[in-house]
Image: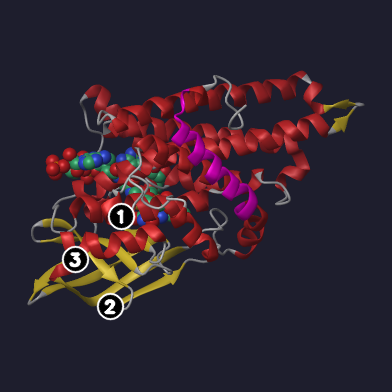
């Protein structure tokens, strides 16, 4: 099999370029990331030294055109890259999701020519790190209620407020911050050394430990006019970025599920109880068959979604269905794999528990499972449950 679990031979339809990129990222994850991730997970750190390598592989801003320093590849390839990164850890995929979909995408789509020329090559290479501030302590699922305010002053804006649960917040060189203004929500590029801006890492996480998460604070923080994103006003600005990241998550979690399945299958073949490998027991086979079925369905879903996205046909509700389905699928697979590993399944000598704990965050961020249910409910019925 070309790429781990591929029960329906989906990779037969990959182009040579798609195959080559999967192999490159897969090899990087296996050889350079997997040997160190358990230590980072224990310590609650991210392997900062691999960031330039992510840039070299084209994993940061996969679809950003070459004229701005990106690799200019397809959305399908973007999905494959996310799958391979999350086979390593959801925190690794998160890093690439945030940098590419939540920082480079808004700059590319809504930024001035000067902002694009300055920031995109630096972010694509990993020379600079970005974060995305939408969520606030009291406004998570309902970002439209945000309290962070930007007030127009001579030459720029003054920001006051705070953002919570921000991936890479305390290591970022630049924060894409969404704030309420007199003309609706607008986006600002806040640089780390701006007076009045501070970021503090959040401690005590039991999920996504190999990923930095922070709280951002703005106290009379002056942001020059040239750091405002001129191309968008209103909540659709940040929400359009979420479509990009949610798309990557729908692919990424398939990688996490495949890693758990591989580990459970190998373990089941080797672990002997009652004089037999536990893979010989019907109940274990049932668990493995469920995993193969659900992963295969999730793979076919994102493969079709990827082709639709490249054709400009993927709507936000198509992305919601895939994010909702695939994250729940991956969490179920991880929990089931954990039962096959039994006591060893709670040890970080194996990958499964790390994936299982990470996926609890993935179920919540980028729109909770419930919010995606309601987005789909609105699409199907024409009735909004939010208003
Ligand atoms: P609503 O009135 O429905 O919409 C306001 C405006 O936005 C437009 N819109 C969208 N545009 C693009 N893409 C979408 N998905 C859109 N959804 C809505 C809409 O057309 C409207 O435009 P206009 O021009 O008419 O004004 O907004 P609402 O306030 O009722 O909220 C809708 C709701 C609940 C679905 C939305 O707020 C939502 O998605 N909430 C979930 C919040 C969320 O996902 N937060 C994620 C934060 S970032 C994160 O978690 C990063 S994790 C990073 C990592 O990978 O580590
Ligand atoms: P709440 O909105 O308070 O929801 C609580 C519960 O109520 C949930 O079960 C929810 O589904 C349910 N609920 C809410 N509204 C409804 C409704 N109308 N109907 C039914 N149920 C409802 N945000 C960023 O901006 N940038 C980041 O980089 C980022 N990174 C993150 C990294 C991690 C590790 C985590 C955990 C979160 C991150 N987030 C980030 C925040 C994330 O997007 C929010 O946690 C998420 O949107 C949910 O918000 P909340 O936690 O405040 O939950």
How far apart marks 2 and 3 lie (CA) works out to 16 Å
Per the image, the residue denoted by label 3 is: 149
- Residue at 61% from the left image edge and 55% from the top image edge: 32
Image quadrant assignment for residue 352: top right
Residue 73 position in % (x across, y down)? 35, 42
Label 1: how many residues lie within 10 Å, few (<14), some (14-19) or many (20+)? many
In the picture, the disc for residue 232 is none
Mark 2 — residue?
194
- The first of marks 1 and 2 along the sequence is 1
**262 sits to left or right of 221:** right
Q: Cβ(mark 3) to ligand 2 < 8 Å?
A: no
Give residue 164's position: percent from left, percent from top. Answer: 37, 61
Q: Main secondary structure of the magenta part?
A: helix
Which of the 4 image quadrants contains residue 151? Answer: bottom left
Does the Cβ of the disc 1 residue fall within 8 Å of ligand 1? no
Lateral position of residue 106 relative to residue 15, left or right: left
Q: How many neighbours does mark 3 have within 10 angstroms: few (below 14), some (14-19), or many (20 or more)?
A: many
| Residue hosting label 1 | 104
Q: What is the C-alpha distance between the residues marked 1 and 3?
A: 23 Å
State left or right for residue 241 relative to residue 180. Answer: right
Closer-to-camera residue (58/38): 58
């Amino acid at each position: 099999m070309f790429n781990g679990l591929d029960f329906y031979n989906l990779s037969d339809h990959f182009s040579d370029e798609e195959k080559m990129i999967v192999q490159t990222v897969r090899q990087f994850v296996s050889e350079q990331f997997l040997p160190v991730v358990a230590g980072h997970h224990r310590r609650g750190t991210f392997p900062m030294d691999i960031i330039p390598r992510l840039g070299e592989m084209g994993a940061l801003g996969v679809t950003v055109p070459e004229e701005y320093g990106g690799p200019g590849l397809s959305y399908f390839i973007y999905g494959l890259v996310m799958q391979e990164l999350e086979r390593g850890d959801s925190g690794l995929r998160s890093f690439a999701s945030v940098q590419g979909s939540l920082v480079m995408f808004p700059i590319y789509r809504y930024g001035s020519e000067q902002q694009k020329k300055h920031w995109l090559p630096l972010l694509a290479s990993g020379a600079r790190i970005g974060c995305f501030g939408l969520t606030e302590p009291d406004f998570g699922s309902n970002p439209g209620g945000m309290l962070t305010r930007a007030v127009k002053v001579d030459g720029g804006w003054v920001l006051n407020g705070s953002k919570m649960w921000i991936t890479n917040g305390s290591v970022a060189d630049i924060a894409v911050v969404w704030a309420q203004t007199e003309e609706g929500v607008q986006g600002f590029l806040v640089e780390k050394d701006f007076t009045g801006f501070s970021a503090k890492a959040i401690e005590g996480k039991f999920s996504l430990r190999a990923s930095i998460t922070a709280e951002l604070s703005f106290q009379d923080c002056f942001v020059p006019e040239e750091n405002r994103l001129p191309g968008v006003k209103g909540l659709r600005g940040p929400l359009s970025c979420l479509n990009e990241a949610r798309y990557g998550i729908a692919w990424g979690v398939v990688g996490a599920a495949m890693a758990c399945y591989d580990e459970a299958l190998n373990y089941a073949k080797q672990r002997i109880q009652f004089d037999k490998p536990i893979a010989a027991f019907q109940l274990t086979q049932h668990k493995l068959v469920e995993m193969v079925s659900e992963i295969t369905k999730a793979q076919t879903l994102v493969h079709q979604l990827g082709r639709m996205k490249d054709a400009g046909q993927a709507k936000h509700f198509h992305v919601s269905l895939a994010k909702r389905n695939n994250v729940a699928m991956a969490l179920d697979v991880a929990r089931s794999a954990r039962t096959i590993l039994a006591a060893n399944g709670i040890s970080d000598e194996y990958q499964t528990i790390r994936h299982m704990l990470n996926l609890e965050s993935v179920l919540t961020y980028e729109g909770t499972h419930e919010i995606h249910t309601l987005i789909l409910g609105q699409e199907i019925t024409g009735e909004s449950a939010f208003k």
